[in-house]
Amino acid sequence: MPVQTYQPIQSFLDYLRYEKRYSAHTLISYQTDLTSFFDHLTLQFGKISLKDINHNFIRSWLTNLKTRGLIAKSLNRKISTLKSFFKYQLKTGMIDATPMVNVISPKIKKRLPVFVTENDTKKLVESLSQSTENWKTLNARMLITIFYSTGMRLSELLSLKEKQIDFSRSQIKVLGKGNKERIIPVSSDVVKIIQNYQQLKRKDFEHTDNVLLVTEKGKKIYPKYAYLLVNKFLGETSTLDKKSPHVLRHTFATHLMNNGADLNAVKELLGHASLASTQVYTHNTIEKLKNVYKKAHPKA
């Protein structure tokens, strides 16, 4: 049952694309999950109408995925896909009730976000400022500086255009998930670093399609290029096992929380849809308070 010929799936994907304005990457994830689900139904039970699908069919698919080694986090993402799909079908009158009511999501053990300590962050910034200037070190400095100063996602930074930077107000307009815009303030030092980068870019390259960050060939920076650069420089100043751009996003949020930032403000800066996503950073703050308590309190 190819997704292109199965109308309920196609109409749902069209709804996500044109009304919800989801990204191409998100649409592919939904399409992959739904295709897998309906392929499983056809293989195990034959042709089933949308209205006849119940929670037992869904559990059968989830059990099959679990036996193939899928972890709880991945299973929950697929459950979320089905919830959205059947909610849409209910809304459009294709079904009378959603079969997801009796489907329970597996519990996920929460892991604290990995972040760079303030001392290691200082070492990282200093090492970048002292590096010999070439396009790779310039890009490493830009990537790490902006990630740490704004908490942007990798996709947001790589697609950042020059026109999104307001130098007079020292702020950057970011286009986040679901095409939602948010404004992130930056320091005057960050503004100067960006301006210097732009001057060098205009000197070496004629056309850069208005994107802020480019490779040494003048082309738009791509995810693997950014990951490898960040990984290399984080590896030189940090002992963390995980050394990805997302670690710098966690570092931005954790350092804000550790220094007394308001949780709602951090939520807005990160572009989180709900406060629940931001609350994970309070755990790191609590761990820091526990350590202070143990070291400083006479009765600890």
Image: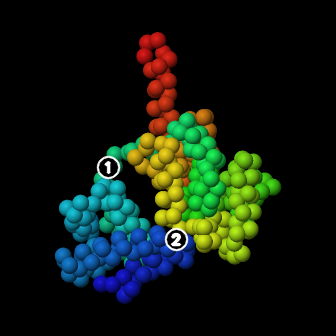
2 or 1: mark nearer the eye: 2
Task: Where is residue 107? Give x, y as percent.
Answer: 32, 49
Please give the residue where the numbered disc 1 appears in the rendered image.
Answer: 107
Q: Residue at x 78, y 53 (%)?
A: 169
- Compared across the picture, whether 167 is left or right of 124 comes to right
**Counting other residues with Cα less than 10 Å from the Cα at mark 2, is it few (<14), some (14-19), or many (20 or more)?**
few
Question: Disc 2 marks which amino acid?
Answer: Ser
Q: SS of the residue at dot 1?
A: loop
Q: Residue at x 40, y 46 (%)?
A: 241
Question: Disc 1 marks which amino acid?
Answer: Lys
Say which quarter of the image contains residue 77. bottom left
Q: Residue furthest right?
A: 168
Task: Where is residue 19? Give x, y as percent.
Answer: 55, 74
Residue 284 is labelled as: none
Please give the residue where the numbered disc 2 appears in the rendered image.
Answer: 23
Quarter of the picture containing the C terminus is: top left
Between marks 2 and 1, how big is the CA–CA gap? 28 Å
Say which quarter of the image contains residue 254. top right
Number of numbered labels in the structure image: 2
Q: Residue at x 22, y 64 (%)?
A: 68
Q: Residue at x 36, y 73 (%)?
A: 32
Task: Where is residue 58? Give x, y as percent.
Answer: 27, 67
Q: Nearer the viewer, residue 158 or 3?
A: 158
- Compared across the picture, whether 198 is left or right of 38 comes to right
Whether residue 246 is visible here, answered yes or no, is no
Whether residue 293 is visible here, answered yes or no, is yes
Q: Earlier in the sequence, mark 2 or mark 1?
A: 2
Q: Nearer the viewer, residue 50 or 139?
A: 139
